[in-house]
Each structure stands twice: as C-alpha cells, then as structure tokens.
Image (cartoon, rainbow, N blue to C red):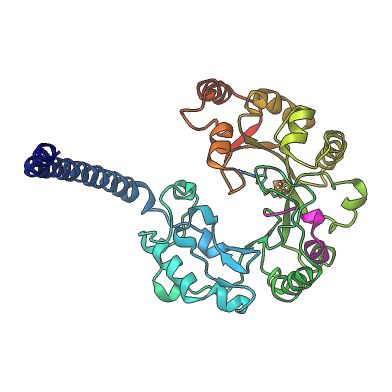
Amino acid sequence: MKQWLKGILKSIPQVKRYHDHLKSLADQRNNRIEAQLNEIIDMYDNYVDETWSGVSRKQVCLLPYRNFDVYADGSVYTCCTAYLRNNYSIGDIYIDKLDDIWNSDRAKRLRYSVSKGNYEYCKRRCPNFENKESSFPRTDWDESCIKDHPKAIGLYIDCTCNLYCPSCRSSIIASSPAENRNITNILMNVIRPALKDCELLTVSPAGEFLASKPIMNLLKTLSREEFPNLKISVITNAQLFTDKRWTELPSGMIDTVSVSVDSTEKDTYETLRRGGKWETLQKNLAFIATLRRSGEIRVLQLNFVMQAANFRQIPAFIATAKQIGADRLCLQQINNMGTFSKEEFDHINIFAEQHPNHSEFQSILADVKGREQGIDIEWG
Ligand SMILES: C[S@@+](CC[C@H](N)C(=O)[O-])C[C@H]1O[C@@H](n2cnc3c(N)ncnc32)[C@H](O)[C@@H]1O
Ligand code: SF4
C-alpha cells in the first residue's frame, strides 16, 4: 500500500509536466485556428467591400424613400425586415404620428446611409442592391426629409388567418375583439388619411386579408373617386375568395391578386396549407382567373414555397399557372419562421446541400431555368 502511494506521489510531477505540455500544444493550436479564422474573416470583408463598392454603392435604393410597412407590434419598416440589420424600424405606429415616423431621425439616418452609399443599416445580401432602376439622386442629410406621404404602404398589422400552414404558424391565430378595435383605429385614423398620396397598398402579407376584420373595414371604405391614384395588391390563400366576397372589395382598385398555392395535388395541398380544402381552392382560383380574363384585375400571380414535400411538383405547377392564365409565378425559398425544430427543418429544407434530395431538386431547378417557360418566374 505504502509502495503504491509512493509510486503515485512520484508520478505527480510527470503528470503535471505532461499536462502543461498538452496545454501548450492546445494553446498553440487554438492560436493557429484563431489566426486562420481572422484571415478568413478578412478575406470575406475584402470580398464584400469590393462587391459593395463595385455594385451597390453606386445605387441609391428607393425603398426608404417610398415604403411604409406596418407590423403587428406597431413597428414601421421601410424594407423587408429580413434584410435590415438589428431589426431597424423607423418608429412605432401606436406611439408616434405617421408624419413623425416618416421623417424620424431613424428614417432620415437610413435614407442618408443609402444616399451616401454605405448602407450601414442594411444586410448585404438584400436583392434590392442590384435593382438597376434605383436612380435616386444623391442627397444630403436635410434632403432625407420627405414632404410627401409614403408611396407604398404594406399592412402586416393583423396576423389573423383562417389557415395555419405548418411553414407559417403552429396554430390558428386570430386577433381578439380588443385588438381588432385597436387595429381598426390605426387603419382608419392614421393609415387612411395617408392613402391620398399612396400609389400602392399591399394587404396582408402577414395574415389573410379576407379573414381580417380591421383590414376589411378599411377596404370597404375606399373608392376610386376618393383615391384616384391608389392601386391595391392582395396576397391570399384564396379559401375565402368567392364571388360574393369580391363584391365587398373596392370596385376598380384591386390591381394584383397573388395566390399562395404550394402544390398541384390535393394531399400535398391539404398538408402544406393546413385547414384549406383543395376543392375550394380550385373553385376560387377559377373565379379569380375569370377576373383576370375580364380585365377586372391587371395581374394574377401564383406562389409556391419550395420544400421537400412539393419540389417534384414544380414543373406541373408552372404548367397549371400557364393553363389558368396567370401572369407570373413566384417560386420562394422556404425559411424557418420559428415553426420548425432544427431537425424538422433539416428534413424539409431541400436548399441545404446535405439534404438527400438536394441534387434532384437542383436538376429540376436547372431544367426550369434552362428553358423558356412562357411565363414570368420570380425567384423569392
Ligand atoms: C404569410 S403568407 C400571408 C398571405 C396569405 N395568407 C397567403 O398565404 O398567401 C405570405 C406568403 O408567405 C409564404 N410563406 C409562408 N411560410 C413561409 C416560409 N416558412 N418561408 C417562406 N415563405 C413562406 C406564403 O406561402 C405566402 O406566399
Ligand atoms: S394562409 Fe398565409 S398567413 Fe395563413 S397560415 Fe398560411 S401562409 Fe400563414
């Protein structure tokens, strides 16, 4: 026993030396990894800066000068929130007056940054940087103040919907009567007066406009006579879009109807558009197509969020869109909007290289892109 203890005590300095040796190897390795990571970050920054100054800095994005998107918590954004850094909103519709939000310091700073070309509040992957139509003249700080009201207003303010698609939400969302009163108050007293200068009103990219009492309350009060320059664009799951509901919408003002379909087969449709009925979609889509044929609406768009369950239906979807007389279709990438666990999303997300069907998906896309399809395709 004594011998054994002596042996252990004797080996302690050796163990300690070995431990120090290992630690120093680990430190060296960590330093090397850190240096390599810093090198990669520098390379990336240089690459971004070159791309940035070569392409983006010459453009002045128009969105901060035109757009006013109002979200459910009251936040107002000039652009898609996915492309703004740090959730950069320009104000709160429940607190500030519309004119004060439109010319708030935050709004002016954003305009100033795009007019000077440093885009400090924008994510660099925003597709609008390549928008060659952006030819707004360079301005200085004071001119970042805009006298007119916004030209485009997006109402994301009510998330109420009749469906609960798995890609979008986990259960039915419906505003309470008190919320409906608050939203109606904002729409009627704050947004409506601003529609005089507005050219495009979009409803409702965060919910279903036909299921939203506040949005329908607003739409029912609009008329071509009172708002001669205003066009309305609606995005819808079409389940409630019947000929009867059509008569509730302001005559001659609906410019674009954008229908989210996601499928060419009943089973897939009823899984991906949870709560929706395939037969109802077919009936209402046929009605909307008659509106397009008669010229009552100018644009009919169909939407399709590409994912594991439906990607093989993309060619059939293009054929259907042409057959019903749609003007364009939008093929969108699936995002995880917080409704899927990581494992669930890995299973659904065919955009990931490691997905088992990724290469099959890529060859379908290559085939679609490689051939003239006879219809406008927008990639979202
Ligand atoms: C949230 S919906 C609101 C409008 C309407 N209720 C509809 O379904 O068209 C707006 C669009 O987002 C799409 N969408 C839903 N979940 C998505 C996701 N996880 N990734 C990308 N787009 C999604 C829908 O298919 C639809 O085209
Ligand atoms: S229909 Fe539109 S808003 Fe409603 S749950 Fe589906 S994607 Fe979301």
The majority secondary structure of the magenta stretch comes to helix
Rendered residue at 81%/55% (across/down): 211
Is-magenta flag for residue 215? yes
Above or below residue 155? Residue 196 is below
> Quick one: quadrant of the C terminus?
top right
Query: In this rendering, would 66 be left or right of 277?
Result: left
**Which residue occupies the foreground of this view, 371 or 27?**
27
Q: Point out the residue furthest to the front here.
A: 1
Q: Which residues are magenta?
A: 206-218
Is residue 326 visible in the rendered image? The answer is no
Tell me residue 222's x, y (percent): 81, 65
Q: Point out the residue furthest to the right here.
A: 244
Above or below residue 134? Residue 191 is below
Rendered residue at 70%/28% (across/down): 317
Tell me residue 191's x, y (percent): 70, 71
Rendered residue at 67%/53% (across/down): 205
Query: In this rendering, would 269 be left or right of 151?
Result: right
Query: In this rendering, would 310 be left or right of 291?
Result: left
> Quick one: quadrant of the N terminus?
top left
Q: Please tell me in which quadrant of the rendered image residue 226 appears.
A: bottom right
Query: In this rendering, would 244 be left or right of 218?
Result: right
Tell me residue 61's x, y (percent): 47, 56
Q: Please tell me in which quadrant of the rendered image residue 57 appears.
A: bottom left
Is residue 285 visible in the rendered image? The answer is yes
Rendered residue at 61%/29% (across/down): 308
